[in-house]
Amino acid sequence: MSTTSNRRKEVNEIHIAPLIKWLLLAFIVGSCGLLFVYVKNQQHFLGARTREVELLTKEVIAQNEVLLARISALSSRTELQRKLEKGMIALQPIQDHSIARLVPPTMSTGPDEVIRTAANERFRP
Amino acid sequence: MAKRRAAIVCAFLALIFTGFSARLIYLQVGKHEEYTALAASKHSIRLTVPARRGMILDRSGEVLAASMPVRKVIIDGSHIKDPVATAKVAAPFLGIDEETLAKELSTSSKYKVVMQVLPEDKAVACKKALDEKSLPGLYFYANSVRTYPNGSVLSHVLGFLSRKNPEDDHLVGVDGVERAYDAYLSGEDGYRHIERDRTGREIVVYRGQEQAPKHGMNVQLTIDMGIQSILESELDSAFKELKPQTAIGIIVNPKTGEVIAMANRPNFDLNDLNTAEPAAMKNRSILDMVEPGSTFKIVVASGALNEHTVTEKTQIFCENGRFSYGGRILRDHHGYGQMTLHDILVKSSNIGSAKMALMMGDEKYYEYVRRFGFGEKTGLGLPGEIPGLVHPPHRWDKLTITRMAMGHSVAVTPLQIVMAMSVIANGGKLMHPQIVKSIKDGDGKEVAHFAPEVVREVVPKAVADYVRDSLIGVVAKGGTATLASVNGYTVAGKTGTAQKVDPKGGYAEGKYVVSFVGFMPAEDPQFVCLIMVDDAKISPGLNYGGLVAAPIFSRVAEKAARYLDLVPSPDAKSILPVAALQGDDDDRTYQQ
């Protein structure tokens, strides 16, 4: 009696179709997971970058405001007067022929017959 | 037996897990709110995004006050790894010596302020240097300081800021425009809900609700810095030469009520408040009460003329300089006989003014005093303005009306005097004084505009014009204020010389408040200017409004005319000011 002929051939068949199905599913799930992690990382990276740009913008705005304040201080009337007194700048009188008057000048009937007015500097108490 | 044991173990395990479950339910449900809040407080915070304070500008857009970003330097002791190394890097930027800074850095405190104000550029450089060497623990928080490019110029009008609470960085206006328009200037802080990781860095993806800050508006004043500088520089000169207790100058556009310039001496530097004396910080133009002296005579002149108590031709006998009334003698500097209203103003006769007031009667005269705006706040809009002191007739004694007519027994603010003179200059209307022209947002778009406002018509134009013509005589040859004249222009004005009130009672001997209030060009006034000098250190024989305040007015008006490019008056008479120095006429009012 042959034992081998009666023996049932026990083979674990590989079912390709479900295997592919499950592998695909695992791949998709895995990819989704990895994608999620990648996107999340990208989000954090971009968030950090956004923050950096925001800080940079803030710094530039702050520096701009500092410069504006300095320009205001350096070009203020008080500062210009100080520079004028120290001789750092000078006032150049505009020649009469260079003035375009919107209102025609009226001659004064004063003794000097000039358009300009005269201060009473001599009579300070 | 075995089954029983198994049952006991199972029951025991069930009990344990029931306990765990109960605890879990308690934590997750019962304590949900508490632990959510605790977790949120650890990681998520409400970050305030501060609003930028608006600027204050003059009428042509010149910056008078602006905010400048700076940084506040904070130490977190728990993050400091090497205090000595950190100090070595940071000390040059902070301007503190290394040893002192190292001591400061050796702290366990998580929040210690090292420096309130560090310039932005230094802070950025310091942070970079510390980051390069990986030295944490020193943090630079955004902060701001208010800067005033013109320092002490216009200090009383602009006002200043102060911390609301000592531990808070939030600044609020405590005086001047900074206080009066704080609601517009300060804006509204924004916020952002953020989450932080364990190192304290923001996790941007978990940003929550946020609201952008509403930055403060820019306030544009009616002040013209060109005219303001002229006034300030002349007041400075006068303050140095005459060494008075105080000096005040105000310039107003009589047609609109716009305050073009306002200055007081002593003053203070807005960028250095620590050195400011409290007395120097007072805006005396609206906070000081003075007896106006003869400048007040315009009230009785206008009232008497308008009520037909007198006409242009009425002759009033001025008692040759001594008028006995109510048991007291009222004097003029010179003895005058019959005088018209014009002459009374030109010669500044106390007796003539007193007689006109008597002819008007208490009630009528009081009505005109009030109609000219005395005894009530002008409504300029700056904090602390006072209404002055004008008693109603039922509180007067017999002499009050005669004293009030020449500017005594009444207390007014310098601004009230200017606004009253503006009534004469603009043809009889009392204007509402304005210091703010408009309010603009950051893009320059006008949010609010303040138009000129007439409070009331005090006298008809004809009456105002007649008084104006008399006031031209005050500055003309033979008047009390020839030194106020400006060659090429017709000036109208009135001098005032009042004895100073002694705080102990009565009047201080030899101390005077002298003033001149005038406008120019008289035929089409572009500005009204008041110069008031309190207790000038000058010989009593020269301490008159016409000799002290009028020349200052003349210098201011002359420069202002040139700055404004005013067309000279066609019929302006040139006056030789030297004639007035002989002191033929004065306006001093005497208390007997």
Image (tube, helix red, strand yellow):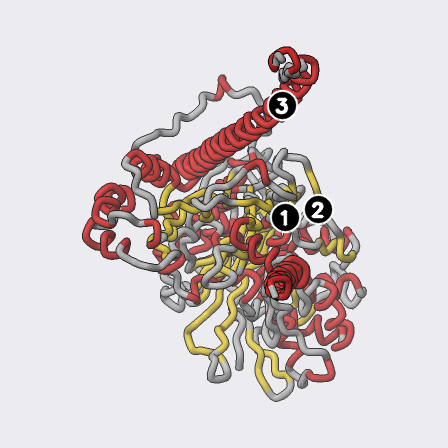
Crowding around mark 3 (Cα neighbors within 10 Å: few <14, some 14 to 19, many 20+) is few
Q: Chain of mark 3?
A: A
Please indicate, yes or no, whether residue A121 appears anywhere in the rendered image.
yes
Q: Nearer the viewer, residue A10 or B231?
A: A10
Residue at position x 49%, y 17% from top?
Answer: A97
Mark carried by residue A36: none
Please indicate, yes or no, whether residue B576 appears anywhere in the rendered image.
no
Residue at position x 53%, y 60% from top?
Answer: B174
Q: Amino acid at mark 3?
A: Ala
> Does label 1 or label 2 sit earlier along the sequence?
1
Residue lying furthest left: B99
Judge left or right: residue B223 versus residue B150.
right
Q: Tag 1, which secondary structure?
A: strand
Please state the horizontal and vertical placement of residue B163, each as a whole percent of the image: 48, 59
Judge left or right: residue B154 versus residue B193.
left
Please state the horizontal and vertical placement of residue B103, each as a whole percent of the image: 23, 56
Circle 2 residue: B450
Q: Is residue B413 above or below residue B116?
A: below
Circle 3 residue: A26
Q: Amino acid at mark 1?
A: Val
Q: Nearer the viewer, residue A123 or B40?
A: B40
Q: Tag 3, which secondary structure?
A: helix
Circle 1 residue: B436
Q: Chain of mark 2?
A: B
Judge left or right: residue B358 versus residue B203.
right
Q: Nearer the viewer, residue B386 or B114?
A: B114
